[in-house]
Image: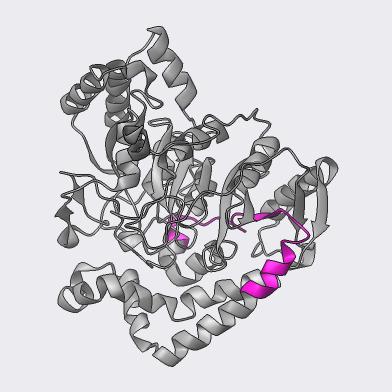
């Protein structure tokens, strides 16, 4: 259907929903009905691939209301969506490829933590097929559009997760981010996309794109919602070989902000985006301690992702399906998968050695800064532009995101409003591994949000059961 919006229209936050449920002005069942009606009113706009039917959603909300000490649950009746590459027991996992679909026999541990905390599962959100793409057009289903209209792409691969939040249907959604899949669609829809340090959130139950780089991420309308959700989802999982403990909380020290020189920023001829970002940089210089940091080693690492052997890692999961069902795969995704066959073990080791050299260079830069700030995207594209030049447009969209997981960084895409011609503008805050809380603190300062930690020492649910 046509999109009448021009920008995000986020709904009530997690805190507001909890207050409504606690105070009696609302309830999980009322919230469930509101969400189901809002989704139905939009029709098939490419946001959701499957949803819990209205009557079943209300029944699930009633079950939450009957749980012991229900109103003390940290996400009591709060609705959320899950990207359709993550398992929820009894629900289809499709990766936007009908011939690949299966019914999950278990729920991903990170999602199960949300359910245990009282959250209400609404459904599975759309994505670029096999989580391969940053634009949202690589799907056999309805191609989603940005809430900014003008036929702008939604971004991907976590297109539906960003839209579900930007449309106000849910306050947060679970996404993934291997090469920018959580940050780019957040930028294109005016919401927050937070990709934590790899390993903080279990990836068990996620169908991997590149298993050594994959990361679950969170879409939300405010930093407080990100904090609340992370406090539930973060936790060590011994079934995930990349799992690790959370880093220290930010301790109110001044945050040193790294900014690349103007000459190193790329906007691909988009003067309005350049002006909007430069205005933000000028404001940041007035409010924070700024140091100049070259972007060159970061960008050099980024070129390794799709111009190097990490493309071949996708064949670990999808190689047999590619061989058996090539016509079931979106043509652009198939082309990318096929390209992975050309790399050798020598190529892989050469790239790993190059990456290690770049990690050493970047590692020294963190001695002088705490957070690196860059644009999330340098420009926007329409659906027609992406369909005409799918690889080129996708590469430009990932210019500032491709290097993140390769260099073991975390990232937050935060909305900055719009350009002079009404398109979304977003900044990305990048931190070294395990500095998540510092990045979130800077994000809150930039967005002028008060911030408090809801669980100073988060105790995993399994540990609570042993107490």
Residue 77 sits in quarter: top left
For this orientation, the residue located farthest to the top is 24
The structure residue drawn at horizontal position 40% and vertical position 12%, both measured from the top left corner, is 22
Foreground residue among 355 and 332: 355
Q: Is residue 422 visible?
A: no
Residue 325, image x, y percentages: 16, 73
Answer whether residue 58 is magenta in the image: no
Side (left or right) of 189 relative to 53: right
Which segment did they paint magenta?
359-385
**In this rendering, is residue 203 above or below 395?**
above
**In this rendering, is residue 50 above or below 454?**
below
The structure residue drawn at horizontal position 16% and vertical position 24%, both measured from the top left corner, is 55
Foreground residue among 264 and 442: 442
Q: Is residue 286 visible?
A: yes
Side (left or right) of 448 relative to 95: right
Q: How many marks?
A: 0
**In this rendering, is residue 29 above or below 240?**
above
Quadrant of image for the C terminus: top left
Residue 195, image x, y percentages: 50, 51
The structure residue drawn at horizontal position 21% and vertical position 22%, both measured from the top left corner, is 63
Quadrant of image for the N terminus: top left
Residue 45, image x, y percentages: 32, 42
Residue 107, image x, y percentages: 24, 46
**In this rendering, is residue 458 above or below 135?**
above
Residue 168 sits in quarter: top left
């Amino acid at each position: 259907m046509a999109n009448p919006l021009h920008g995000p229209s986020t709904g009530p936050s997690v805190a507001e929903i909890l207050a409504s449920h606690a105070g009696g002005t609302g309830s999980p069942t009322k919230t469930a009905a509101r969400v189901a009606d809002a989704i139905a009113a939009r029709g098939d706009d490419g946001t959701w691939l499957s949803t819990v039917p209205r009557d079943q959603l209300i029944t699930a909300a009633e079950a939450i209301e009957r749980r012991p000490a229900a109103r003390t649950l940290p996400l009591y009746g709060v609705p959320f969506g899950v990207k359709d590459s993550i398992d929820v027991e009894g629900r289809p996992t499709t990766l936007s490829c009908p011939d690949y679909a299966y019914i999950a026999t278990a729920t991903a541990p990170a999602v199960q933590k949300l359910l245990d905390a009282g959250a209400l599962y609404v459904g599975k959100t759309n994505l670029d097929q096999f989580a391969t793409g940053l634009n949202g057009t690589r799907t056999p289903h309805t191609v989603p559009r940005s809430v900014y209209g003008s036929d702008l792409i939604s971004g991907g691969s976590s297109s539906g997760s960003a839209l579900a939040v930007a449309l106000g249907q849910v306050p947060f959604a679970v996404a993934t981010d291997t090469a920018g899949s959580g940050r780019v669609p957040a930028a294109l829809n005016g919401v927050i996309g937070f990709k934590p340090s790899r390993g903080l959130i279990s990836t068990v139950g996620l169908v991997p794109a590149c298993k050594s780089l994959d990361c679950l991420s969170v879409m939300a309308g405010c930093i407080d919602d990100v904090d609340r959700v992370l406090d539930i989802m973060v936790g060590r999982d011994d079934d995930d070989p990349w799992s690790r403990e959370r880093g220290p909380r930010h301790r109110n020290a001044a945050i040193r902000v790294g900014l690349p020189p103007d000459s190193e920023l790329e906007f691909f001829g988009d003067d309005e985006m350049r002006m909007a970002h430069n205005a933000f940089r000028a404001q940041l210089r007035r409010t924070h301690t700024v140091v100049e940091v070259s972007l060159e080693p970061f960008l050099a690492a980024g070129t390794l992702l799709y111009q190097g052997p990490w493309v071949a890692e996708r064949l670990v999961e999808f190689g047999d399906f590619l061989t058996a069902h090539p016509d079931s795969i979106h043509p652009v995704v198939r082309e990318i998968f096929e390209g992975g066959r050309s790399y050798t073990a020598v190529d892989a080791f050469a790239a790993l050695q190059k990456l290690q050299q770049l990690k050493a260079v970047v590692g020294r830069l963190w001695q002088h800064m705490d957070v690196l700030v860059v644009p999330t995207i340098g420009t926007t594209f329409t659906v027609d532009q992406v369909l005409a030049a799918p690889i080129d447009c996708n590469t430009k969209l990932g210019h500032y995101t491709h290097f993140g997981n390769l260099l073991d960084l975390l990232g937050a895409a935060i909305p900055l409003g719009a350009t002079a011609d009404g398109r979304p503008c977003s900044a990305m805050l990048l931190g070294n591994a395990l500095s998540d809380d510092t990045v979130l603190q800077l994000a809150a300062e930039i967005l002028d949000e008060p911030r408090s930690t809801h669980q100073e020492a988060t105790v995993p649910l399994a540990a609570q059961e042993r107490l």
